[in-house]
Amino acid sequence: MSKKTIIISIVSVILVSGLAVLALVLINGKPNTPDETSEAKGPQPGDSVIITKTPEYKACELFTSDSLQSILGDKVSAVVNGERNGVVAANLQVADACDYTFTTSTSKENKLSIQVYQYSVSTEGSSNLEQYDATWRNVNVVADPEYTKGYPAYFKSSNVDDKKIFQMYVIGGAKNFRFAISQPLSSQYFSDQEVVTMMIKFANDANYEVTNASGEDIPPAPNV
């Protein structure tokens, strides 16, 4: 095959490919890049939010250092002061979050995360992802020690990648609250029951009033 023939063949392939792309653009609009596809899905629970776009609900003021240490217990040391950050909550609201790290005898990679975010009523067809099915423990029904706060509350533990995640959601009317402890699976220190006890203490002892702005219109807690 001559050089001229080869060049003509390459040019033909390029032209055909270009026409195919042009046809797709005319039919569907410009092709989605990976970034555009991700953006089209919108924010997802757990995504980070910059501080300047995060409402101040005072998540780092729900507990004092002493009260946190008391709940976590004497076997926990080196509780690092909370670091404020923003995150997308389970119902796609922006949560004011506070993360603490602490040390146990088996690991330094333990985290307590607290989120405070606006309660929003679920409506048909909404993207509210807060659904508490049978995999969640209804703390209002079964609690040890006794859960006394009265707000609807749900607990769940699960394995996520290489971590054990314990979560407690408290639905308090104007605000929702998430308390979560994560531990490395390879060096898990607390049992599920120990963390249930801690979570109920968090739910009972949190200073919820500090998160409500003066004059805020507080809707009733959901009927669950």
Image: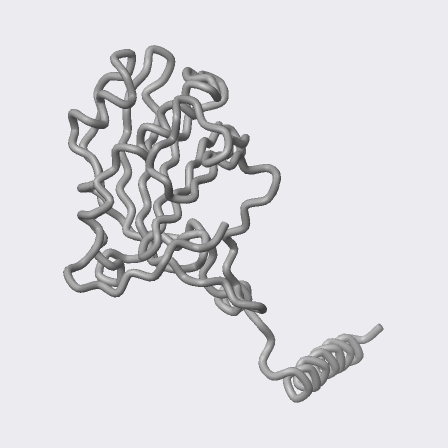
**Whether residue 53 is situated above or below residue 19 in the rendered picture:** above
Residue at 45 percent of width and 52 percent of height: 90
**Whether residue 70 is situated above or below residue 111 in the rendered picture:** above
Residue at 38 percent of width and 44 percent of height: 151
Residue 158 rendering spot, x and y as whole percentages = 54, 32
For the residue pair 199 and 32, the one nearer the viewer reads as 199
- Toward the right, the furthest residue is 1
- Toward the bottom, the furthest residue is 26
Residue at 42 percent of width and 49 percent of height: 46
Q: Taking 94 as reference, is 44 left or right?
A: right
Q: Taking 36 as reference, is 177 left or right?
A: left
For the residue pair 41 and 65, the one nearer the viewer reads as 65
Residue 22 rendering spot, x and y as whole percentages = 66, 85
Residue 4 rendering spot, x and y as whole percentages = 76, 80
Q: Taking 65 as reference, is 185 left or right?
A: right
Which quarter of the figure is the N terminus placed in? bottom right
* Colouring: one colour
For the residue pair 89 and 221, the one nearer the viewer reads as 221
Residue 91 rendering spot, x and y as whole percentages = 45, 57
Residue at 24 percent of width and 59 percent of height: 55
Q: How many marks?
A: 0
